[in-house]
Image (cartoon, helix red, strand yellow):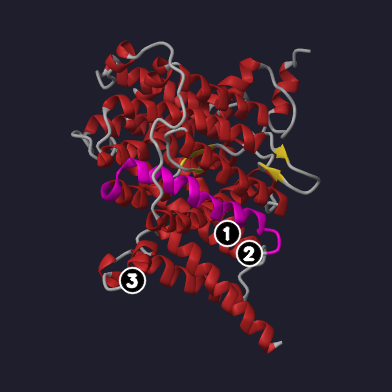
Amino acid sequence: MKASKEEDRNLIYQLEGRPSLSVAVPLGLQHVLAMFAGNLAPIFIVAGIAGVSMQERVLMIQCAMLVSGLATFIQLYPIKLGKNLQIGANLPIVMGTAFAFVPTLSTIAASYGIQAVFGGILVGAFVEIIMGLLIKPAKNIFSPVIIGAVLVTIGIKLLGIGANYFAGGVGASDFGSLENLFLGSLVFLIVIVLQRYGKGFFKVTALLIGLVVGFIVALMMGKVDLTPVMEASWFTIPMPLYFKPEFRLDAIMAFAAVYIVSGLETLGNTSGITMAAFNREATPSENQGAILADAIGSQVAGLFNCLPNTAFGQNAGIVAMTKVVNKFCIAMGAAVLILASIVPKVGAVFAAMPSSVLGGAVITVFAMILINGFKMLAKAGFTEKNVLILSVTFAIGYGLTALPEVTAHFHPFLQFIFSDAVASVCIVGIIANIFLNLLSHKKG
């Protein structure tokens, strides 16, 4: 039975239920448009370093869209493996290519080639699978104060990415130009005005409306190149194992470390969604399912010629901003990703979106991630122990990443950890939490 307008308005704020396609598809498109550039950017970087051909890059892009769509479906509609175990969180989580892996991916691609990258992706993911299986007994290690600190760090990191998009994208010849700043500001203002004063459909689709208006204005300004759309083929099915994996121990160990960070990032974004949408922390089952889906999705990515997945922070921000949590709406976005993976022209249209237009839409979304981190820290409470944990976490975990020269004489593994703020905040926070908990038990 077709849902009425009133039912549609109610359903989009509920986890279950099936709103009409006229409502669900635009809401799903918001998520696709918000994550599309970020989903593909790591591939552009690693493919360039590995020296793969243009045809192989197109294949990697198609595969990234396919795997992101499949991994998102698993998060929305989990695979049950028994009474107490499932792969997937049963939450409105959108999966995409993980930025956290880029430094390691780049190093391995430059040293050993693209085959060693895929070998490391496939084997290293077992570490995150183990992490997911042990997350319930280890829940005290990943306390709300640690996840809150991770969310704050992710938010700060994403704000920098948003600012780069706003100005035209890193490496753009017209980076910071008045045209780019105008487009970014136009979209930004449209989103803010609709969020503040819009009603009903216009309010919840503020990002999509901003992007569409920005795209049209950019097209009129001559900032959109439609040549790739014209040249793209209509139908191609991505095939697995185009790149034969090569297994090197040092590459696998490097990936294993980053998979822990990716798991914690997924934990942070999962909690960000539950805090924003349901005003509660994620349950142990939701955390376990989210991490297992992240790990399995990354292994599927390795088989299908693309890079590891993670829960995307910008999409958690969309949930925080719009309060739309309906899984069917998000599933429509995942379906569009899968469609784009087999119809290259669809992907080419998305890829033609100017970076400044995208930046204007998502920079506020990224700020919401930061705010959700603050909310989680406030909910955890600023007790003497929590304040001390946060002080150590941010002083060492975040402070040392500001100046690479400080860690120049560290062991290469530690240099890698402190090269990424999310990684170092996660690991330092966990160590500080364990250490201070042990001291508290001894004192007691």
Q: Position of residue 189 (x, y in %)?
A: 42, 32
- Amino acid type of disc 3? His
Part of the protein shown in magenta: 110-137
Quarter the N terminus occupies? top right
Q: Residue furthest left?
A: 173
Point 29% across, 48% down: residue: 112
Q: Which residue is mark 2?
A: 143
Q: Marks 1 and 2, how far apart in space?
A: 6 Å
Q: Marks 3 and 2, how far apart in space?
A: 28 Å
Give above or below for 9 relative to 131: above
- 228 sits left or right of 350 in the view: left
- The answer to which quarter of the image holds residue 58 is top left
Q: Position of residue 60 (x, y in %)?
A: 39, 31
Q: Which residue is mark 1?
A: 147
Give above or below for 112 relative to 39: below
Dot placed on the residue nearer the N-terminal end, 3 or 2? 2
User: Looking at the image, do the residues carrying marks 1 and 2 touch, with CB atoms under 8 Å apart?
Assistant: yes
